[in-house]
Amino acid sequence: MVTSYSNNVRKRLTDRGRVRPPYMVRIGIAMLQGARHEHCEAIQHAAIEMNVDVEVVELRKKSELDSTIQGLILPGGESTTMRIASQSESLLDGIFEWISNHPKRPVLGTCAGAILLANPGKNHTPFIDLEVSRNAWGRQKFSFEAPVTVSLKTPEIIHEAHFEIGRDRYNHKPLPMLNRVANMTTKTFSGIFIRAPRFIEESIRCEKVATLENETVGVLQGSKLALTFHPELTNDRRFHRWLINEVIDDKS
């Protein structure tokens, strides 16, 4: 669990009418592959920015998923590898069952996570209504960063987050980031595309919330947000704040 910031700071901001009262959320992150530790750091930063206390639950097996998980992150990686890696502990099966059993609870899927939302496989109905082309931007060497236009409504920052996470019990430490907060007055986002999938434009039957020039790179269907890029690799936490805010607003 990460406490957002000191009670004195919280009291000063609350007295000035700038923040809501503290709220605890419990977010699960699938620890299969990809920048999962960076997602952990991003959700903790986002919680501080919103004056919310968060407990990050690192999910490695199906038995760790239960009704106390209020929101979920499916990180990037390689979707086939993730399916194989999850077999011994049935994690993906558990995740898909959890999403089906809690249809109003928010899920953020990035890169391979977006593929899994569109193509959960087996007897699961897709959670986002579109078709995806895997690795459609090309191999690793063709990865790139470009400005993405975002129309998704996200909470504002009320308190800047300046902290660095140490190594976890597995001796892993998130990638270093510049210790600054992105300018939230702009609608653009620095999209990082790494062996990224592409949404097949004519198949999209959900809300388009992020575009790269004329191409859709982010969609929203109910409480499911799918992005073909990696927001966890930037200092802009708007998508993670969206997830926390959806948890707070969810009454299921």
Image: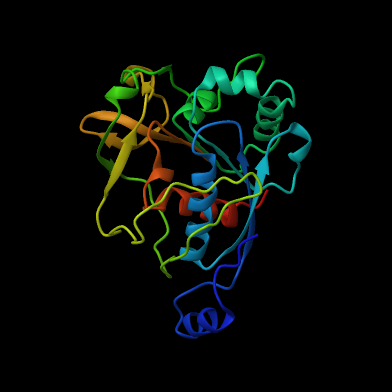
At horizontal 49% and vertical 48% (from top left) the residue drawn is 174
Question: In which image quadrant can residue 2 be found?
Answer: bottom right
Question: Where is residue 196 shown, x and y percent of the image?
Answer: 37, 25
Residue sitting nearer the eye, 212 or 164: 164
Residue 186 is left or right of residue 92, and the answer is: left
Question: In which image quadrant can residue 212 be found?
Answer: top left
Whether residue 156 is visible: yes
Residue sitting nearer the eye, 119 or 250: 119
Question: Where is residue 171 shown, x and y percent of the image?
Answer: 60, 46
Asked if residue 139 is positioned above or below residue 160 in the image, the reply reads above
At horizontal 55% and vertical 17% (from top left) the residue drawn is 80
At horizontal 39% and vertical 22% (from top left) the residue drawn is 197
Residue 16 is left or right of residue 97, and the answer is: left
Question: In which image quadrant can residue 66 be found?
Answer: top right
Question: Where is residue 159 shown, x and y percent of the image?
Answer: 43, 70
Q: Which quadrant is home to the N terminus?
A: bottom right
